[in-house]
Image (cartoon, rainbow, N blue to C red):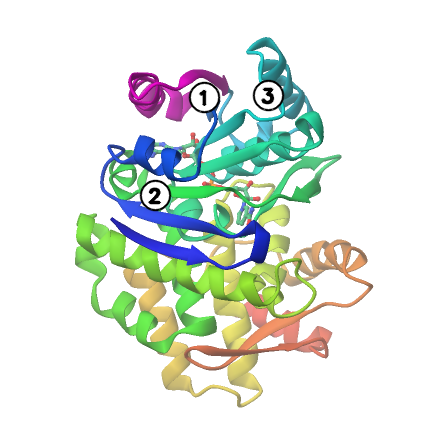
Amino acid sequence: MDRLFVNLGANSYDITFSDRFLSLADELKKINAPEKLLIVTDTNVEKLYADDVNELLNNAGYNSSIYAFSAGEENKTMDTILGICGACVKNGLDRKSMIVALGGGVVGDMAGFAAAIYMRGIDFVQIPTTLLSQSDSSVGGKTGTDFMESKNILGAFHQPKLVYINVNTLKTLPEIQFISGMGEVIKHGIIRDAEFYEFIKNNPEKIKSLDSETLIKMAKRNCGIKAEVVEEDEKESGLRAILNFGHTIGHAVESAMNFTMTHGECVGLGMAAVCRIAYNRGMISEKILQDIENVMTSYGFKVKENIPDAKTVYAFMQKDKKKANGKLNFVLPVAIGEVVRVSDVTEAEIFDAIDYISL
Ligand SMILES: NC(=O)c1ccc[n+]([C@@H]2O[C@H](COP(=O)([O-])OP(=O)(O)OC[C@H]3O[C@@H](n4cnc5c(N)ncnc54)[C@H](O)[C@@H]3O)[C@@H](O)[C@H]2O)c1
């Protein structure tokens, strides 16, 4: 079994990589999981995997049951959190019981947050089933929910006890969700690891055909990069902000498009935009700019899209700015594998970048 150790002192845990669920019970035994488990999932993943996982756990001697909430970011609400907590009460979970988050980033964030507040905090494990959650969101302990039209505004840092990745779950993932997740994968290469970037660049066919061995290798490096950053800066007071590469403009595009595009598609546009800013500043060459855009395009991203005008997108950025001490922070590439954080990008540079990604 491939595994990685996330070293966070008392909050450390393993991430395991497989192409099946078979070893899940053994991995739970290794962390001394309690008998009482609640699998929290969404209605899509429930149909695909919840019964198999539940049966596997009950056969291994656990007392496990399933709670599913309606799939989709629009259900990332406090009401859903209360629904999960209600299921914990109804199923008799106590302080020693454990939540098993089975699903994408929405499930992981919500089940993790419910675990953080139920009885002042119980343990949980992550079984991520989307590319985004297998590459990014299941590692790092950020949990939470959207509230009053603000994304992830309520939440807690609550690290899982284990992350169990079965890459074969990606075989049922809709293509648009796979492309969306590739945004985070490409991002990891650009911000931290030139060798990994080359691997992504040179293997689009193997990756897109969901070859298990290739996916495990990719997941392992993705989680390794996320873990390294989180180990250095668990609570996002510094370095962890580099994970926001492409997000400043990406988030604004997402809002300006009224969430009709996936998060990953918008982050992809945001990455193209900040690369343009870096190119205009002479920080990266035209060759690197073109290379990044070619890699993104090879995975189905559009680096130019029919989006609202620069003024409208910029207005949404101002809203985000209020949440970040009044500053617009950007992460810009200086080379493949290396980025810097800046807060002096001018309005003119931003307008040019938004025009650049507009059709
Ligand atoms: N905690 C963090 O560090 C962090 C980081 C990045 C993003 N996020 C959060 O992650 C969320 C997005 O996550 P996501 O992209 O995984 O979205 P998601 O959880 O909504 O999943 C996308 C869709 O795929 C379905 N699905 C999941 N697994 C499937 C499978 N194997 N086969 C078929 N369908 C499947 C889901 O039901 C859903 O309809 C956002 O809410 C974002 O805020 C959190």
Label 2 or label 3, whichever comes before in sequence order: 3
Task: Tell me where residue 214 appears, x and y as whole percent.
Answer: 21, 56
The magenta segment is 42-68
Q: Is the magenta stretch mostly helix, strand or loop?
A: helix
Task: Tell me where residue 175 appears, x and y as whole percent.
Answer: 31, 42
In this rendering, the label closer to the viewer, 1 or 3: 1
In what element is the residue under mark 2?
strand
Q: Name the one closer to the observer, 67 or 180.
A: 67
- Looking at the image, residue 70 sits to the left or right of residue 114; the answer is left
Could you tell me the amino acid type at mark 1?
Answer: Glu
What is the spatial separation of the Cα atoms under label 1 and label 2, in whole angstroms? 21 Å
Q: Is 276 located above or below residue 322 in the figure?
A: below
Q: Name the one closer to the observer, 15 or 134.
A: 15
Q: Name the one closer to the observer, 264 or 159.
A: 159
Question: What residue is at 51 percent from the left and 28 percent from the top?
Answer: 99
Could you tell me the amino acid type at mark 2?
Answer: Ile
Q: Is 257 located above or below residue 309 in the figure?
A: above
Residue marked by disc 1: 35
In what element is the residue under mark 1?
loop
Asked whether residue 30 is drawn in magenta, I would say: no
